Image (cartoon, rainbow, N blue to C red):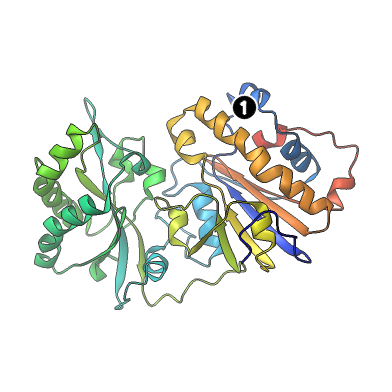
Amino acid sequence: MATSASLPYNRGMTQLDLLLPFAMPPAEMARDLLRELNMPSLALLMARASRTAHQASDGFSRALPHEYWLASQFGLPANDSDTSPAVAASGMRTFNLPLEGGNWFVLQPAHLHITRDHLVLTDHRQLQLTESDARALFAIVLPLFEEVGKTLFYGDAQTWFMRADDWNTLQTSTPDAACGHNIDIWMPKGAHERDWRRLQNEIQMHWHGNAINDQREARGLKAINSVWLWGGTPVALEPAQTKFEEIFTFSPIKESFAALVGKQIPVTSIAEIINSQTQRGLLIQDELTEAGLAGDWSEWLMRFQAMEALLFAPLLDAIRNGQLQKLHITISHNTAYSTFAVGASSLRKFWAKPSLARLAS
């Protein structure tokens, strides 16, 4: 694969899908936020694109809209909004872990913030959990899983996997859907929810007051005081099938749903993607999620503005020059997503004046 933006483009790429979680601003703030952005290339692309898909939810689904979109693109069961998409087996394949049959869940170390009358799940991107600390915490609780007949595998610091064949009906939520909220309605529900809560409580007690957490708090970091269960998948499920030949990212995605759907190829420019000889690729740009979940709109504006030069100007040039035939842009916020398609013929709609307004539609 080409590694320099200065290399010539190949003969062309058929289609690139760009996923931009949280690129849709909240309706009540959209006008003010969009006015602060100076993104002429994106404005032209959005004004002349055709919207090909739109889906909204009530805000209480157990996964975010872009997570359901990703699941659908990779053939992962995600038809039931009462549970998170079945991503555990796909994640285990991504980490090259052995699949031994049965039903597997994703298990993530977590921090629960205690308020006056409820618990709130903290965004896992804020935890800064190192491999050494994570492996030590894993070793502390591994015997608890063995005692109750559950297998526990380590993927990386933020991603573990648990086998629980008899818990296959548990309804779970992705951490991004639940974070920032009272966890009561987002906790696993079903016939074995009490068994899970009992195990969760044991884990919390073993980590409470542990030297690892004491050292983290001394460094100004949040204690790892709980775990989050989601993504239950029967391993009998076939490997994910997708139309994408490759998944690209500018920043390695290690702490979200997107990290589990398949292996990512890190790139530094749009030219690298075009030069990859891939005919149909997916580019996941997850830089807005943390700010969007936190409601940090100053940070959101700064990160979004940086994408004009990094993404949209070169993508517009690639379409104009015939190096990219079709671009699909999927944008979302916490209750909806929309997909827009644009190609060379779309750019000839001279009557459609550049505007970012469709980001809020």
Residue at (32% x, 38% y) in the render: 122
Q: Nearer the viewer, residue 306 or 95?
A: 306
Instruction: Say left or right for 131 vs 55.
Output: left
Q: Position of residue 66 (x, y in %)?
A: 53, 49
309 displayed left or right of 322: left
Question: Image quadrant for the C terminus?
Answer: top right
Residue 86: percent from the left, percent from the top?
A: 41, 63
Q: Residue furthest top?
A: 32
Question: Could you tell me if residue 77 is visible in this image?
Answer: yes
Binning the other alpha carbons within 10 Å of mark 1 as few (below 14), some (14 to 19) or many (20 upward) gives some
Q: Quadrant of residue 25?
A: top right
Q: Residue visible at 62% across and 33% down?
A: 305
For this rendering, which residue is in front, 138 or 60? Answer: 138
Which SS class for mark 1?
A: helix
Left or right of 153 on screen, residue 76: right
- Residue visible at 37% across and 42% down in the picture: 125
Please provide percent x and percent y for residue 126: 34, 38
Q: Is residue 121 above or below residue 232?
A: above
Q: Quadrant of residue 165?
A: bottom left
What residue do we see at 43% from left, 42% from top?
60
What kind of residue is marked 1? Answer: Ala
Q: Which residue in the structure is indicated by mark 1?
A: 30
Residue 51 location (% of width, % of height): 73, 47
Q: From where the camera sits, is residue 50 visible?
A: no
Quarter placement of the N terminus: bottom right
The number of discs equals: 1
Nearest the eye: 297 or 171 = 297
